[in-house]
Image (cartoon, rainbow, N blue to C red):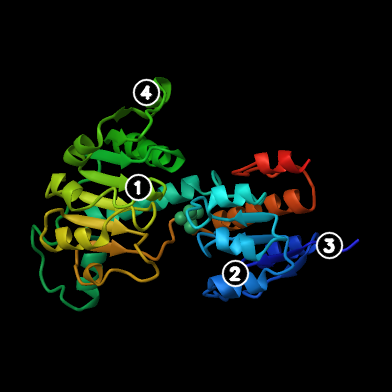
Amino acid sequence: MSRPRILVAIPVFAEVLARLGEHFDVDAPCGTDTTIDWTADSLAARLQGAAGVLVAGAPRIDAGLLDACPGLRAVCSMAVGYNNIDLPACTAAGVLVSNAPDVLTETTADFGFALMMAAARRITESEHFLRAGRWTHWSYDLFAGADVHGATLGVLGMGRIGQAIARRGKGGFGMKVLYHNRSRLDAAIEQQLGAQWVAKDELLQRADHLVIVVPYSAASHHLVGAAELALMKPTATLTNIARGGVVDDAALAQALRERRIAAAGLDVFEGEPAVHPGLLTVPNVVLTPHIASASLPTRRAMADLAATNLIAVLAIEGTPPTALNPEVLDRRS
Ligand code: DGY
């Protein structure tokens, strides 16, 4: 019996490729270290005859691609965010989609917290100063920043990662935790986290350190723009580990330049890997290349989870643990 063919469209661990190779004919043009800038056409061409594809936060999987690849049955992502995948179009086409939640929660929360602390305590800015040989004197206010311990943490988006950040703020740093989410958490969970729901404007007004962790969608596009930034304290920091596009980067660059907020920590950008030029020239922002989930054990767990989903769907071994549209499988049986 011929084995299903799959495309691994991103670079992944050799061990994960080997595991997939036990079940599939694996087309892995990226191997372990080459990134391909897929276009819709090049991806569709490469997917001809493939039953499944392993992706991450890119490339884009949309209705046009599904039309061009009628043999496709599974799109398994090693990212938790899946705004690059048109889920309704996949469901309509009978294509199972999975993402990779949970395995990255703590690692991503660690990074969000680190970015927030780096922004508050001006770590990048002061390191650049030191490396440039400009450290010639001591002064009481040399790179004096904001305290994190005891400050008010504002979490915008209280899903799994938001809750993990709240736990760090409350338990480790004695912070007062406010949050805003479209739906409120159960009272018992709020109590456990020591977190208080407030309206979005109140969150922006009261937070000393705002951390943004909402998924990207049309509804969250520019959720924080010029009007929202204007509500924040001039001493506040903003950290974005959600997705580019949730924050209006041009408005943020201007607010940072004019010191209308103190600092920012950004791991995600509109149009990444391009970064708004205004952000590259202001000193009071810490910039990282979308690496919040990038510890080796976590990236391995994310890739393994995507592989497990592919094997379950296409090699019919178990049920896909993190399917986003499992109803597709019911329709198949
Ligand atoms: C995710 O998993 O969504 C992270 O942002 C990495 O892409």
Q: Which residue is mark 4?
A: 191
* Element carrying mark 2: loop
Q: Is residue 289 above or below residue 35?
A: above
Q: What type is the residue that disc 3 sits on?
A: Arg
Q: Which residue is mark 3?
A: 3
Q: Is residue 163 above or below residue 280?
A: above
> Are the residues at dot 3 and dot 1 in contact (C-beta closer than 8 Å)?
no
Picture coordinates of residue 165, whole percent (x, y): 38, 42
Circle nearer the viewer, 3 or 4: 3
Distance between the Cα atoms at labels 2 and 3? 22 Å
Q: Which residue is mark 2?
A: 11
Name the residue nearer the viewer: 102 or 174. Answer: 102
> Are the residues at dot 2 and dot 4 in contact (C-beta closer than 8 Å)?
no
Disc nearer the start of the sequence (3/1): 3
User: Which residue is situated farthest in the bottom direction here?
Assistant: 133
User: Which residue is situated farthest in the right direction here?
Assistant: 1
Label 2: few (<14), some (14–19) or many (≥20) C-alpha neighbours in 10 Å? some
Q: Which residue is mark 1?
A: 220
In screen coordinates, is 237 left or right of 35?
Answer: left
- Residue at 78% x, 62% y is 24
Picture coordinates of residue 290, whole percent (x, y): 42, 62
Distance between the Cα atoms at labels 1 and 4? 27 Å
Q: Quadrant of residue 259?
A: bottom left
